[in-house]
Image: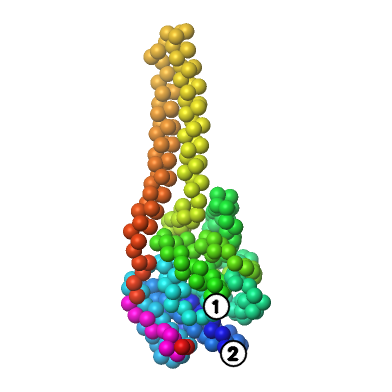
Amino acid sequence: MRTVTILIPAYNEEEVLTILYQRLDEVLLGLPKYHWEILFVNDGSQDNTLTLIKYLWQKDKRISYLDLSRNYGKETAMIAGLDHALGDAVILIDADLQDPPELIPEMIENWELGYDDVYAKRKSRLGETKFKKYTASTFYRMLKRLTKIPIQENTGDFRLLDRRCVEALKQLRETQRYTKGLFSWIGFNKKEILFDRDPRAAGESKWNYFKLFELAIEGITSFTTAPLRISSYLGGTISVFAFIYMIIVICKTLVYRDAVQGYPSLMVAILFLGGIQLLSLGIIGEYIGRIFNETKRRPLYFVDEYNGQKSKVI
Ligand code: UDP
Ligand code: MG
């Protein structure tokens, strides 16, 4: 019998865990041909999430849990989960029921057909503002153009990964993880299935626009050095114009001898160039920051407690 792990990162999800468990349980009842592992990763929750998980763990022997030493963020919680997952396939799912567990049978079907990465693509984004939809789609378009890897639009982390993909992802130990890009980067046979993304069942999204903006920068800087090149092009173009303008200014001075005039153009040039320089420095800084973080070679996370199925399976 093949084992399938359901990996659920959870950060302050006490309000939804019970409903999630019930809905999962129902779905899994319909799939008796597999050995299930439900692996919760408690990402340093401050509420009763861990107590609830432990309660469920006592009730249900399919459940394992991993308690991280603090809140590391979802990306790290996921790799921690992948490191501990035992399944021949791993299904990543959000705790807040925005990813309907009812899609799991279809994922499994496709896995049986031989696909390694069955990802769920959102047909609609219910419960999200127009502005969020717009920013998300613009971002994806930009990222696709800048990077050379096909990054799937409207796709979250909700997917089934074959062991091969899991092992591949486990080898990518970068500290600043942009998992969505990593899924594409590792390749393998991908299959898309469509679904309607529900609004959160309860609780609040942990993302705000500032965090989303940071994630966007993360996405770009971890997959492409195009911004560096853009700033070089920009610098080059501006230098050419500046040179032409310099010649004009010199000629004018020689012909008309009105050297003192030109305060506005001087100001414009200084401010414009200053802006461009700061922007380029900022872009370079982003990359240096990444280099700095990666060269520290810190472990990605620390585990406070792990109660897994290891002994049960082997
Ligand atoms: N999550 C996590 N650590 C965090 C933030 C979120 O493990 O620091 C989990 C959270 O419990 C949920 C999933 O990641 O299962 C998605 O989080 P959220 O719903 O806040 O994000 P959104 O759906 O708005 O993208
Ligand atoms: Mg959510």
Identify the image quadrant of residue 277.
top left
**Which residue does the image show at 40% across and 62% down from the upper left?**
175
Question: Residue 113: percent from the left, percent from the top?
Answer: 67, 77
Residue 233 visible in this rendered orientation of the protein = yes
Q: Which residue is mark 1?
A: 89
Q: Which mark, residue 184?
A: none
Packing grade of label 1 (10 A; few <14, some 14-19, many >=20) is many
Please state which amino acid type lies under the numbered disc 2: Pro
For the question of whether residue 120 can be seen, the reply is no
Tell me if residue 280 comes above or below residue 263 in the rendering.
below
| Tag 2 residue | 32
| Left or right side of 286 for 220 | right
Residue 210 to residue 27: above or below: above
Q: Residue type at mark 1?
A: Ala
Label 2 within 8 A of ligand 1 by Cβ: no
Residue 126 location (% of width, % of height)? 58, 67
The x and y percentages for residue 212 are: 46, 58
Image vertical order of residue 106 relative to residue 284, above or below: below
- Horizontal side, residue 81 vs residue 145: left or right: left
**Coloring basis for residues:** rainbow
Instruction: Check disc 2 and report its element: helix, strand or loop.
Output: loop
Q: Mark 2, residues whose alpha carbon is within 10 Å: few (<14), some, or many (≥20)? A: few
Q: Which residues are magenta?
A: 304-312
Vertical order, 1 against 128 (above or below): below
Q: Is residue 309 magenta?
A: yes
The residue carrying mark 1 has its beta carbon less than 8 Å from ligand 1: no
Q: Nearer the viewer, residue 239 or 115?
A: 115
